[in-house]
Amino acid sequence: MSENKDNTSSSSDTEQQLDRTELAEQIGETVSQNSKHLIHCLTIIGQVEGHYILPPTDKTTKYEHIMPALAAIEQDRSIEGLLIILNTVGGDVEAGLAIAELISGMKTPTVSIVLGGGHSIGVPLAVSADRSFIVPSATMTIHPVRMNGLVLGVPQTMRCFEAMQERITGFVCRNSRISPERYTRLMLNTGELVMDMGTVLDGESAVREGLIDSLGSLSDAVSCLYSLIEKGEKRYPDD
């Protein structure tokens, strides 16, 4: 009897390990096991994919994977914090902004860190966490909303672009220390990018502008998340 129980337990552990490996391989998510606090690691890499499927050769983050994962993390009492690692070139505006809104509305303590790049719609994603970090070598590109393909050359199209840009600017400024005026000035800069308008900020510049909270490494981000977990209130107080 005990041998059967041992075999069942071993089989269950193996299945859980395979599930964790598959999760990490397919959608870039891992849950720490032997750590001070149980945290979930979520990666946002490549292009943020929206309603249209990008070519299989492109590295993408699919919003239909991330959004239900965030809902599950928020409900899971065993997960104490969320670490968001970003290295993204941007992508679909509505999908990226939807993910950012979900993160900003979570009671679960959240910390983001930008490695490599947090460009375009990656900016709202980076600032959506409770605390944001960036490594010195990382960069963030701030530029106006753009659209590919056929558009109607009418005033309503321009107003649609303006409304979308206002949503992004408002979100970024509510979740960081940069002012709307300064953000708009950086966004409309015409003296830096050859084929576009906008501004590229390195790690130190992003912190100096108030876009990102702190300059730091992975260990700094994890330590900050542990501190938020230990100082914060319970998400689901006992009745």
Image (spheres, rainbow, N blue to C red):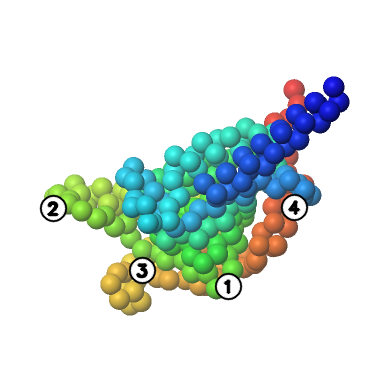
**Residue picked out by circle 3:** 198
Which secondary structure, mark 3?
loop
Residue drawn where x is 58% and y is 48% of the image: 24
Q: Nearer the viewer, mark 1 or mark 4?
A: 1
- Work out whether 75 lies above or below 132: above
Pick whichever of labels 3 and 2 is earlier in the sequence.
2
Which secondary structure, mark 4?
helix
Name the residue furthest right. 2
Which secondary structure, mark 1?
loop
Residue 167 shown left or right of residue 123 in the figure: left
Amino acid at pointer 2: Gly
Separation of residues labelled 2 and 1 (CA atoms) = 42 Å
Category of crowding for the residue at label 4, using alpha-carbon neighbours closer than 10 angstroms: few (below 14), some (14–19), many (at least 20):
few
Residue drawn where x is 69% and y is 52% of the image: 225
Separation of residues labelled 2 and 4 (CA atoms) = 52 Å
Category of crowding for the residue at label 1, using alpha-carbon neighbours closer than 10 angstroms: few (below 14), some (14–19), many (at least 20):
some
**Residue picked out by circle 1:** 136
Separation of residues labelled 1 and 4 (CA atoms) = 23 Å
Q: Nearer the viewer, mark 1 or mark 3?
A: 1
**Residue picked out by circle 2:** 153
Amino acid at pointer 4: Ser
Residue 56 shown left or right of residue 175 in the figure: left
Category of crowding for the residue at label 2, using alpha-carbon neighbours closer than 10 angstroms: few (below 14), some (14–19), many (at least 20):
few
Pick whichever of labels 1 and 3 is earlier in the sequence.
1
Residue 172 shown left or right of residue 12 in the figure: left
Tell me if label 1 and label 3 are in contact, CB under 8 Å.
no
